[in-house]
Image: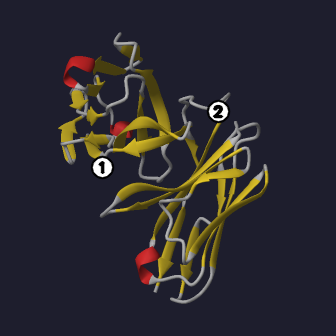
Amino acid sequence: AQKVTQAQTEISVVEKEDVTLDCVYETRDTTYYLFWYKQPPSGELVFLIRRNSFDEQNEISGRYSWNFQKSTSSFNFTITASQVVDSAVYFCALSELIQGAQKLVFGQGTRLTINP
Amino acid sequence: DARVTQTPRHKVTEMGQEVTMRCQPILGHNTVFWYRQTMMQGLELLAYFRNRAPLDDSGMPKDRFSAEMPDATLATLKIQPSEPRDSAVYFCASGFAPGTATHYEQYFGPGTRLTVT
């Protein structure tokens, strides 16, 4: 069965520090997709990134970057020069196909607190 | 900008009462998902639809939960009768699947926070 593990339950850093959120997944599929979502205190889940299993290039978007390593089944997320507004719960998710339709399997989430 | 909307945002009800949650997916999206979020279980998929047809509702307690899409702009999740263990945040998400066997991002609504006393 597909599984996503976010071992860090909570992380707390001081503003401007860099922080990395870990995500490890398990799947038997050869083609799969990985996602990150952000859940700020308002509660809504915000889509951040989608990455397919054939593309191991690192992705950078502003202060956010993602490191996908198939060899270790990891898809880690780094925030550079963190800001208070980055405080949120971050979810990693794996996409699986059941009967030809997609289902997302979410990790338990990492609560990130950025202190001023 | 286009967003998934959910009503109500908060609902407090007594055990045994019927609860109906509504979702309006993003216009043009052809898949709709219902998730439940609790501290203990995290995010769980309850049901999902593609082109208004239910594809999988195996995550839903069948005896009390039901999900429907009366039309392309409305999805509903109903609990009857409600129980205290149903207290959670219920999220609706929508996405566009150009075909079967595709992977795509889902866009989430703000959620309905349900409290059953």
Q: State the SS at label 2.
A: loop
**Picture coordinates of residue B25, whole percent (x, y):** 69, 47
| Label 2 – label 1 distance at C-alpha | 26 Å
Residues tagged 2 and 1 counted as in contact (Cβ below 8 A) = no
Q: Which chain carries label 1?
A: A
Q: On the rendered structure, is A95 left or right of B28? A: left
Which residue is denoted by mark 1 in the rendering?
Answer: A108
**Callouts 2 and 1 in the same chain:** no
In the orientation shown, which residue stands out farthest toward the top? A57
Question: Residue at image x 35%, y 10%?
Answer: A57
**Picture coordinates of residue B111, whole percent (x, y):** 55, 58
Q: On the rendered structure, is A103 left or right of B65? A: left
Mark 2 crowdedness (10 Å alpha carbons): few <14, some 14-19, many ≥20: some
Q: Which mark is residue B97?
A: 2
Q: State the SS at label 1.
A: loop
In the orientation shown, which residue stands out farthest toward the right? B71
> Taking B114 as reference, is A60 above or below it?
above
Q: Residue A59 carries which label?
A: none
What kind of residue is marked 2?
A: Ala
Mark 1 crowdedness (10 Å alpha carbons): few <14, some 14-19, many ≥20: many
Foreground pick, B104 / B7? B104
**Picture coordinates of residue B26, whole percent (x, y):** 70, 42
Q: On the rendered structure, is B85 left or right of B96? A: left
* Residue B38, quarter of the rendered image: bottom left
> Taking A23 as reference, is B20 above or below it?
below
Quarter of the figure with the C terminus of chain A: top left
Quarter of the figure with the N terminus of chain A: top left
Question: Residue at image x 68%, y 28%?
Answer: B98
**Picture coordinates of residue B96, whole percent (x, y):** 66, 34
What kind of residue is marked 1?
A: Gln
